[in-house]
Image: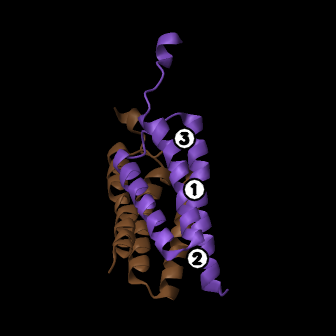
Chain colours: A brown, B purple
């Protein structure tokens, strides 16, 4: 494995792994207002298609990275699109 | 070009293109508080490494998609990390 292949593996780990702190951030704030709905839909659809492309390539890193990213995106989408509890009313 | 290759191209277009509405959303709100700083740093570093990997692959789609994504991320980083004007003081 040469330096460029290692760069590719680190790249995949970083772009997928970056969504772990994002999901923690979103769960802590219970808010994703600054995250564009259209970004979430287009990016999520793109990640699904990367997954399909990975199946065709038979590339485990592409399959895994995109499956994990998609799962993490669903948490952000849940916070963004689920109705919020009316916290102000009970406080 | 088969259906899977088309899926890969559409995937690249969507994951990169999704950052156009995100940047517009961020510019309109002048806020990126719900976007994790760590996500921005890790994702941005990952995108730079994908770009390097693309140079080695000699893959124009990988090079272009990641160059454009990186440029769009810098706008989000600018809004997130630049000091905000003290709007409240002048209002």
Q: Residue furthest right?
A: B1
- Viewer-proximal residue among B74 and B19: B74
Q: Quadrant of residue A71?
A: bottom left
- Residue A82 at x, y percent in the picture: 47, 53
User: Which label's residue is closer to the chain start, 1 or 3?
Assistant: 3
Residue at image location 36% in from the left, 43% down from the top: A29
The chain to which mark 2 is attached is B
Q: Is residue A91 visible?
A: yes
Mark 3: few, some, or many residues within 10 Å (few <14, many ≥20)? many
Which image quarter: residue A58?
bottom left
- Picture coordinates of residue A7, whole percent (x, y): 37, 69
State the residue at coordinates (57%, 37%): B27
Query: Total of numbered circles in the picture?
Result: 3
The x, y position of residue A1, in whole percent, is 32, 81
Q: Secondary structure at mark 3?
A: helix
* Disc 2 to disc 1: CB gap under 8 Å: no
For label 1, the residue is B68
User: Separation of disc 2 and disc 1 at Cα?
Assistant: 17 Å
Given contact means CB atoms under 8 Å apart, are the residues at marks 3 and 2 in contact?
A: no
Per the rendering, the mark at residue B8 is 2
Chain under numbered label 1: B
The disc, 3 or 2, on the residue closer to the chain's N-terminal end is 2
Residue named by callout 3: B26
**Is residue B2 placed above or below B27 in the rendered structure?**
below
Query: In terms of secondary structure, where does tag 1 sit?
Result: helix
What secondary structure is found at the residue carrying circle 2? helix
Q: Earlier in the sequence, mark 2 or mark 1?
A: 2
């Amino acid at each position: 494995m040469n330096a460029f292949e290692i760069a590719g593996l680190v790249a995949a780990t970083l772009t997928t792994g970056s969504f772990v702190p994002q999901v923690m951030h979103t769960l802590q704030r219970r808010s994703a207002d600054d995250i564009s709905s259209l970004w979430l839909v287009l990016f999520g659809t793109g990640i699904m298609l990367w997954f399909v492309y990975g199946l065709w390539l038979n590339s485990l890193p592409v399959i895994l990275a995109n499956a994990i990213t998609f799962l993490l995106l669903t948490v952000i989408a849940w916070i963004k699109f689920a109705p919020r509890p009316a916290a102000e009313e009970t406080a």
